[in-house]
Image: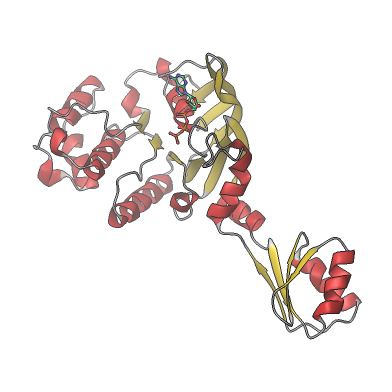
Amino acid sequence: MIELDALTKRYGGTTAVDGLTCTVRPGRVTGFLGPNGAGKSTTLRMVLGLHAPSSGTVTVAGRVFGSLPRGLRHVGALLDAADVHGGLSAVGHLWALARGNRIPRSRVGEVLDEVGLSSVGKRRIGGFSLGMKQRLGIATALLGDPPVLLFDEPFNGLDPEGVLWVRGLFGRLAAEGRTVFVSSHLMSEMENTAEHLVVIGRGRLIADESLTAFSARSAGRRVVVRTPEAARLAGVLAAAGAVVTPSGEETLTVTGMGLERVGELAFEYSVPLRELSGHGASLEAAFMELTAASVEYLAGDRR
Ligand SMILES: Nc1ncnc2c1ncn2[C@@H]1O[C@H](COP(=O)(O)OP(=O)(O)OP(=O)(O)O)[C@@H](O)[C@H]1O
């Protein structure tokens, strides 16, 4: 597992990662979510020992990763798919890495097969599309058959078929008992990918919970109630602190009060109901709301 303890990184006056504490567990896909500039890449670089923390610690399987020999066998990572030597072939690139990490050559063919690049293995990487580079980056991460895998924005440049394939792959890797930590700035990408979420904003932890718990929190935010006595019910609900908006002759939209309480009050005041339903914000909207205060740049500078 990956353990972050009060992990902090400062660049001059900017605090990119600010006292982050969490544990990323094996056997499930953990989504690492945050708006642009939240500190995701910086965190992943510290996990890999590429950047030293200003304070706090991060360990992989109980050890600082930089101190582990033959790194690719312990942690596989896709950070920046474009960061490859364009003059090499995919096979050449992977061979070089396999040699440096004492990984058998046979793994090169296996991982190219796994990511669907076998037929272009001998072609120069410089001619690859962004999606092909993403696949090569994933092949690189898988090369050492590591128990811990990090992926920074792996969906970038992938077509819908590619997105589905990556989701399936991550699910399989997690089911094999590996730790799979995947960053994204889009909740929609994580919705069908991750089982657990770590959400950050401006370098700070905002949420560390299952996707189910996150969904439950965002569901039922708006209650729609239909009754022939809409005006009377509106008065009762407003007096109890809800914000009530009529949306039709018999229909009210209620916020600031849960579905159960609306039902209880209607019962208490003998208001007959024809509909009582909870409507959630989309997960994307819930995520945006959660991180709104920590977005680095807002359109129109609405800060
Ligand atoms: N080498 C650096 N020098 C100075 N500031 C940096 C450096 N690297 C990152 N930062 C700053 O740290 C903050 C976090 O950046 P980081 O790239 O980790 O965020 P991110 O969540 O990965 O964003 P994105 O989704 O845009 O990739 C930003 O304000 C960024 O400008």
**Residue 104 percent across, percent down from the top left:** 20, 29
Query: Does 181 sit above or below residue 87?
Result: below
Q: Position of residue 139 (x, y in %)?
A: 26, 38
Left or right: residue 260 compared with residue 302: right
Q: How is the image coloured?
A: secondary structure
> Is residue 218 placed above or below 203 in the rendered structure?
below
Horizontal side of 233 relative to 8 (left or right) equals right
Residue 56 placement, left or right of 164: right
- Residue 95 to residue 240: above or below: above
The quarter of the image holding the C terminus is top right
Picture residue at 57% right of the left edge, 31% below the top: 202
Foreground of the two, 153 or 249: 249
Query: Where does the image place residue 142, in percent across and percent down from the top left?
Result: 30, 37
- What residue appears at the point 43 percent right and 24 percent down from the top-left corner? 45
Answer with the quarter of the image where residue 294 lies.
top right
Pick the residue in front: 231 or 109: 231
Q: Residue 99's quadrant in the figure?
A: top left
Q: Position of residue 154 (x, y in %)?
A: 36, 42
Instruction: Name the one closer to the observer, 246 or 198.
Output: 246
